[in-house]
Image: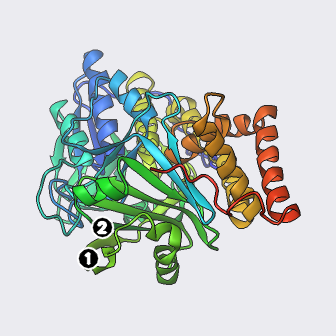
Amino acid sequence: MLRPMPAAPGEESLHDLKLEDGSRVAVIGGAPAGSFFSYFLLQTAQRMGLDLQVDIYEPRDFSLPAPQGCNMCGGIISESLVQALTVEGINLPTTVVQRGIDSYVLHMEEGSVRIDTPLHEKRIAAVHRGSGPRTIKEKKWRSLDGFLLELATEKGARVARERVDGIAWQDGKPQVKTRGGLSQTYDLLAVGTGVNSGTLKIFEELRLGYKAPQTAKTYIRELYLGREMIEKHLGSAMHVFLLNMPRLEFAALIPKGDYVTLVLLGEIDAALVEAFLAAPAVSRCLPLNWRELKEFCHCSPKINIQSAVQPFADRLVFIGDAGVTRLYKDGIGAAYRTAKAAALTAVFDGVSSEDFRRRYWPVCRSISTDNALGKLIFLVTRHIQRWPHDRRGVLRMVSKEQQGDGQRRMSMVLWDIFTGSAPYKDILLRTLHPAFLAGLVWSVAVDYWDKTINGGSHGNGRVGQNVP
């Protein structure tokens, strides 16, 4: 559980650490967290008549394909984040969104079912974090990370193509040292690097109370199929798999332009990847000859599964994955929330530890508390994956909802679990609604009666086959 650490005796935070005209701010990492922070910091400061200098340290060039310009991420932006950015005046251009996702297809061993947008207005964006995979045939798209970094530079931020390899304190202010030999002192340092960066170890060694997040390994592979083949086999749907495979928490195929991104979460190794790809439910989604395509881009990045301890100190704040993020889903949305909260705190309150504790900390705590409920939801999901009657009951319930005009309770729950568009607390409360529980129990009971009592005489062993 995310928790604050008390200041050591004699190290209590000062309450008058404020940003002033001419104050210098360093941001380590130009990915979404760092770019959002710089954008909102400069936007708010300008509205307040405050002149700040912001330097973003980012050695990668997001206009390049992987691995040079990639941030190793599945690249899904939830509709709730798309809507929030629109309110901020940030509209994702069509050159960034490789494909708009308008539905999900849920696959189990027992069958498949399509889940359309519950309110017929929600949309999800599939994006690349660099300009595309290593094997990209033609550059057609812009990087999401590059687009956000451009927004920050348009507000006045300066990008330093330097890799940070040292942090020191000079006269109570953070000093940033780079591999290229630069050394600069700042009034505030925001750390927006991901958990795959070695930079976070530097801060643990400073003994400021910060402890990096706990992580788990994932697997991401980009498959080149071509737009025509993707449209034929996958369409504009994200395909999610709940298969009875030990150590597999979540799996999905995400169409993006000419590519399909495979994302696996759990205790991933080579044997599990091959077992998943050989599963009949997966084979049905892909062309027969897809394995003949030898070229692919893949990586095994770490993700944040347990928030950092003490993600702030005097003149120092950790944002995005370096501090706290949503469990498994909507990491870019969490980067937006934490970055904006940290930026507003710095401008309106100050940059002391107490300032961040008072205004920034509640946002981090809210995400972390919600993640605890998310772990409970995924525990239930794993239970469903193990028991055939439960799996068929879920498919039966969703299929009935998608074919009717009534309340789509299970469809809405699954939609928000897959997309990360709603807090886990809201999802959990909906699963405790009497109508939801009654519908699920009834669907499981019908399956049990059909398969066990009647020996399957009234069914063909497959449910939910409403996928075009």
| Looking at the image, residue 399 lies above or below residue 227 | above
Tell me the element at label 2.
Answer: strand
Percent x, y of residue 406: 65, 28
Seen from this angle, which residue lies furthest top? 48
Q: Is residue 389 left or right of residue 381?
A: right
Count up the numbered dots.
2
The one of 45 and 287 positioned closer to us in this rendering: 287
Q: Can residue 199 be seen by looking at this rendering?
A: yes
**Figure coloring:** rainbow
Dot 1 alpha-carbon crowd within 10 angstroms: few under 14, some 14 to 19, many 20 or more: few
- Pointer 1 with pointer 2, Cβ within 8 A: yes
- The reply to whether residue 211 is in sight is no
The residue singled out by tag 2 in the image is 223
Q: Amino acid at mark 2?
A: Leu
Most extreme residue toward the right, as rendered? 453
Question: What number is the disc on residue 111?
Answer: none
Q: Earlier in the sequence, mark 1 or mark 2?
A: 2
Q: Is residue 304 above or below residue 282?
A: above
Q: Position of residue 258 (x, y in %)?
A: 23, 57
Percent of width and height locating residue 81: 42, 34
Residue at the outermost bottom position: 271
Picture coordinates of residue 392, whole percent (x, y): 70, 57
Q: What residue is rendered at 20% in x and 58% in y?
A: 60
Q: Residue at x 41, y 22 (%)?
A: 348
Which image quadrant for residue 199? Answer: bottom left
- 164, above or below 327, in the image: below
* Inter-mark Cα distance, 1 to 2: 8 Å
Q: Which mark is residue 293?
A: 1
